Image: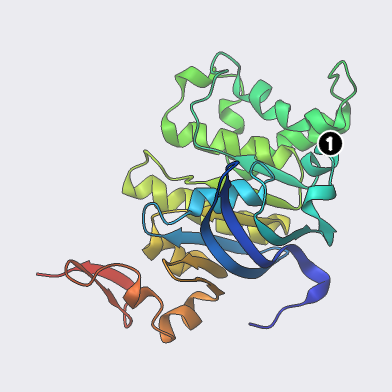
């Protein structure tokens, strides 16, 4: 892949991820290397239990690295304080929302927290950013609704709008299509693709929707049992990466269509 070093937002160098106890170290994956560019949509895929969530938690500084380094905008992630990190990286997780009594506007406005004073007063600029985020995900008409009144698909768009209102260089989403039907899975991922083009932000998401990710992503991180591979979807297909992602007794990958099928 041709990489413009001036536009690298997030970089992993010889990264090892996993868990430490007082007695042992459990390595989930090692020798992870990638450079995520500005304005790209990147999908993180792999089989269940392979370590996708562990990698995401490490990249957002929730879980410490075992070895290697992560650079965000050229700075070592571990050296970035909480406030500065919140101005560079925003997160959309799958945990149930604890503040569903808030209106859509109020929830999206929480994205401005890194920029407001200690009282949390919103300026005109904050309001403009919030309204722009609502427009970008096409939910301006929902801004006065309470979040408990929304469908899963609508709520996912609200959470994405909150991340956009945070105005960071990169947005990280953990399984953004969970609980959605096939149409809304495609809608959300197509929306993420559209947002990278319109905002210039880098968007990294984990997903089991590998077929959709292949079609929509600029590049992908594929986690396998023995290695982690980063490349453009077309290069991953041509090198046979997806053909060995799952046991062949049930699932096969068709390199001509770029999709998986069930063996008969």
Q: Residue at x 57, y 29 (%)?
A: 141
Q: Is residue 102 left or right of residue 215?
A: right
Q: In the rendered image of this protein, does residue 177 appear above or below residue 200?
A: above
Foreground residue among 166 and 174: 174
Residue 84 rendering spot, x and y as whole percentages: 85, 42
Residue labelled with disc 1: 83
Asked if residue 134 shows in the view, the reply is no
For the residue pair 154 and 16, the one nearer the viewer reads as 16
Q: Residue furthest bottom?
A: 238
Please give the name of the residue rendered at 53% of the width and 24% of the height, measured from the top-left corner: 97
Vertical position of residue 17 compared to residue 6: above or below: above
Please, which residue is most extreme toward the front here?
23
Q: Using a 10 Å C-alpha cutoff, classify the residue at mark 1 as few (fewer than 14 neighbours), some (14 to 19) or many (20 or more).
A: few
- Measured from the top left, where is residue 197 in percent x and y? 66, 61
Q: Which structural element holds mark 1?
A: helix
Q: Quadrant of the C terminus?
A: bottom left
Q: Position of residue 58 (x, y in %)?
A: 63, 49
Q: Is residue 203 left or right of residue 243?
A: right
- Left/right placement of residue 243 relative to residue 23 reads left
- Looking at this view, is 132 or 219 the one in front? 219
User: What residue do we see at 67% from left, 21% from top?
Assistant: 106
């Amino acid at each position: 892949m041709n990489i413009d070093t001036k536009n690298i937002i997030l970089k992993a160098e010889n990264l090892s991820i996993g868990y430490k106890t007082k007695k042992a170290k459990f390595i989930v994956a090692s020798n992870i290397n990638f450079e995520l560019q500005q304005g790209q949509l990147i999908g993180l895929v792999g089989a269940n239990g392979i370590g996708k969530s562990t990698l995401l938690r490490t990249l957002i500084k929730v879980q410490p690295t075992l070895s290697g380094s992560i650079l965000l905008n050229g700075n070592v992630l571990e050296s970035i304080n909480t406030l500065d990190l919140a101005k560079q990286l925003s997160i959309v997780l799958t945990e149930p929302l604890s503040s569903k009594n808030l209106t859509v506007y109020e929830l999206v406005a929480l994205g401005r927290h890194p920029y407001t004073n200690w009282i949390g007063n919103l300026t005109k600029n904050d309001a403009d950013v919030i309204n722009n985020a609502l427009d970008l995900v096409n939910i301006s008409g929902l801004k006065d609704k309470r979040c408990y009144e929304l469908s899963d698909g609508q709520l996912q768009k609200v959470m994405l709008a909150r991340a956009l209102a945070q105005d960071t260089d990169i947005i990280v989403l953990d399984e953004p299509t969970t609980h959605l039907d096939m149409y809304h899975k495609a809608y959300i991922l197509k929306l993420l693709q559209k947002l990278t083009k319109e905002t210039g932000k880098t968007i990294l998401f984990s997903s089991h929707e590998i077929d959709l990710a292949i079609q929509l992503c600029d590049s992908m991180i594929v986690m396998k049992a023995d290695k982690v591979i980063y490349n453009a979807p077309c290069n991953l297909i041509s090198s046979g990466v997806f053909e060995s992602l799952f046991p062949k007794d049930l699932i096969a990958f068709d390199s001509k269509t770029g999709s998986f099928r069930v063996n008969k």
